[in-house]
Structures are given as C-alpha cells and as structure tokens.
Image: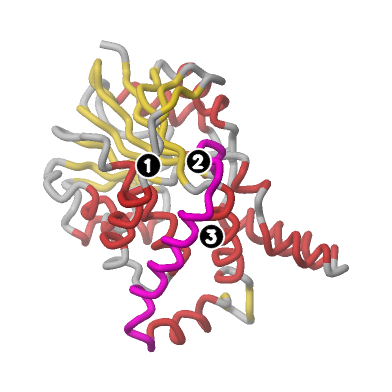
C-alpha cells in the first residue's frame, strides 16, 4: 500500500503492506501462539515499529514484563521501565530487560530532566487517566530531539465493537450494555481518541508528530474485537479465555492456521486509513 498524507492533521501517513503485517505475525506468534487477539493486534504493531528506530537510553512507559519490548528491540540494553501495577513491574524487574523498573504512575517518573534519548509506550497511553500530564512528563524526560514511539487506540476501538451489537440486535439490550461496559472497564479506555485529537495532545505536550501508521482497519478490527470481547467475558472467578486457551493450545497447528485467517482479513480490507489503532513517532524539539 502506498504512503499518503493524512489531510486532517497534515501528518505524513504510512500504510503497511500486507506482507509486513504477516511477517509481524510470524514474529509475535512466538510470544502468543494460542492467544489470537494478542497475536493479531501485536502483529500490526510489530510491523509498524520496524519503521522506527530507538537507541541510547530508553524509557519504556507501561513496560509490563518486557517480553514484547525485547522482541521488537532485541539490541536495546540501556532501558528503564515504568509501570504502576506492582506485579507487572516486578515481572519487568525479573525479566532482565530493564536496568531499573519504577513502580509509579506515569506522570510522576523519578528520573532527571532530559535524561533519555528515546521513549516507548506500547498500548499504554490510552489507559492513562492524566494523558496531558503523562505526555508532559515524557517530554520532560526526553533529551532535546528525543523521540517517543508509541501505539494507541482510536475512537474506532469503541465504535466497531461487534459482539455487543450482535447481542443487542438479538433483543438483549441490557446484556449487550453490560458486556460493553465490562469490556471498557477491563481495558480502562480513558483516551480512545480520534487521530487528530491524538496529534493535538502530542503537540500540546511539546511533541511534533513525524509519522503516523494506521493499524487494524474495519474488518481486522471487527474480528479482533469479537475475539477479544469473547476472551474477556466473565465467568465465575475468571474469564472465557481460560476455557478457550486449553482448546487452542492442544492443537499445534493453530498458529499456522490462524495466520491464514489474518491473511484473508488483510485481503478483505477496503479502507486502510480509517483504523482502530495507530503507531506514532513524535519528537521533542531540539
């Protein structure tokens, strides 16, 4: 797919070729072979990040266990993680990926001004209650000319939710509303913003958007959201994913077969610009 300008915000947009997304799937399937929502979404992110470069001292905002960071940036060796979840932060410390992991909210990072060459935030900014404060804090931590590579979700992540719509059309509106509310609560979507609103948020924090890569158009999003919503439907003290995972993991051919489904979804897409996610590269002024 050719690169075209995003006219709404005058930000250059790159459209990912299908072959790069499938290559991304091949990479991430090693981490999530039997969790199709994760391998599907992260395949797009992986393909997009391959058009970025980060090096030097790196800040990972919302680091988690570090496995996905290491997959994307295998040569990064001077990395500081930040995660407000104590258990996630501890897994990050034990991973060996990070020199240090701070257990803190992302608008209060205990690091000096201008002390990082680059920052990374994978699918974390949309969960931040104080988005403006977090972006300002990242800007403070970056050296002049430093970049932030990040993936986010857009308003389409909410607009295109398929399972609640199906249940509503079947006449079970209360159940549909409850399911949709549980899904939003699970993901804690504080900022499912339109692309131009994300651009404005970066600009207000002193960050200039250098590139925008849309990820997961309509058909990919609909199937992803159907899978992800089903996976996280509550049951007893757990979720449906606990029932689905053993079935999928008992079939060693599943990751290879699911790749064919991803390939078919890519073939179906018609509008590659209107998407439920995006990967941005933004830069602090020198």
What mark, if any, has residue 64 been given in the picture?
A: none
Residue 55 image position (x, y, % from top left):
16, 34
| Relative to 213, residue 178 above or below | below
Distance from disc 2 to disc 3, alpha carbons, whole Å, reads 16 Å
Residue at position x 38%, y 45% from top? 122
Q: Nearer the viewer, mark 1 or mark 3?
A: 1
Q: Is residue 262 magenta?
A: yes
Q: Please state the extent of the stretch shown in magenta in the rendering.
A: 250-275
Task: Name the element at disc 2.
Answer: loop
Residue at position x 41%, y 41% from top? 151
Q: Nearer the viewer, mark 2 or mark 3?
A: 2
Residue 113 image position (x, y, % from top left):
27, 21
Few, some or many residues within 10 Å of mark 3 (<14, 14–19, 20+): many
| Relative to 21, residue 231 above or below | below
Residues under numbered marks 1 and 2 in contact, where contact means CB atoms less than 8 Å apart: yes
| Relative to 77, residue 66 above or below | below
| Relative to 185, residue 277 above or below | above
Residue 57 image position (x, y, % from top left):
17, 34
Which of 221 and 249 lies nearest the eye of the viewer? 221
> Which residue position is annotated with label 1?
16
Residue 83 image position (x, y, % from top left):
37, 48
> Which residue position is annotated with label 3?
224
> Which residue position is annotated with label 2?
272
Q: Is residue 92 left or right of residue 55?
A: right
Determine which quarter of the picture holds residue 119: top left
């Amino acid at each position: 797919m050719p690169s075209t300008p995003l006219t709404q915000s005058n930000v250059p947009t790159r459209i990912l070729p299908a072959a790069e997304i499938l290559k991304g799937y091949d990479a991430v399937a090693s981490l999530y072979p039997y969790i199709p929502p994760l391998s599907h979404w992260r395949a797009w992110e992986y393909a997009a990040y391959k058009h970025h470069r980060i090096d030097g001292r790196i800040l990972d905002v919302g680091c988690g266990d570090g496995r996905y960071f290491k997959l994307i940036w295998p040569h990064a060796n001077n990395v500081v993680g930040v995660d407000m979840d104590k258990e996630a932060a501890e897994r990050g410390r034990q991973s060996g990926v990070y020199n240090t992991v701070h257990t803190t909210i992302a608008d209060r990072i205990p690091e000096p001004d201008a002390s990082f060459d680059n920052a990374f935030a994978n699918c974390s900014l949309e969960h931040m209650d104080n988005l403006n404060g977090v972006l300002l804090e990242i800007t403070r931590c970056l050296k002049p000319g430093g970049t932030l590579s990040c993936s986010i979700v857009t308003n389409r992540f909410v607009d295109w939710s398929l399972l609640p719509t199906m249940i509503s059309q079947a006449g079970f509106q209360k159940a549909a509303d409850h399911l949709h509310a549980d899904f939003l609560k699970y993901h804690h979507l504080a900022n499912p913003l339109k692309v131009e609103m994300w651009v404005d948020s970066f600009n207000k924090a002193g960050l200039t958007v250098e590139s925008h890569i849309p990820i997961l158009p309509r058909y990919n999003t609909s199937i992803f959201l159907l899978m992800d919503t089903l996976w996280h439907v509550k049951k007893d003290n757990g979720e449906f994913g606990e029932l689905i995972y053993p079935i999928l993991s008992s079939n060693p051919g599943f990751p290879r077969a699911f790749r064919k489904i991803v390939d078919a979804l890519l073939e179906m897409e018609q509008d590659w610009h209107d998407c439920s996610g995006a990967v941005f590269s933004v830069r602090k002024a020198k």
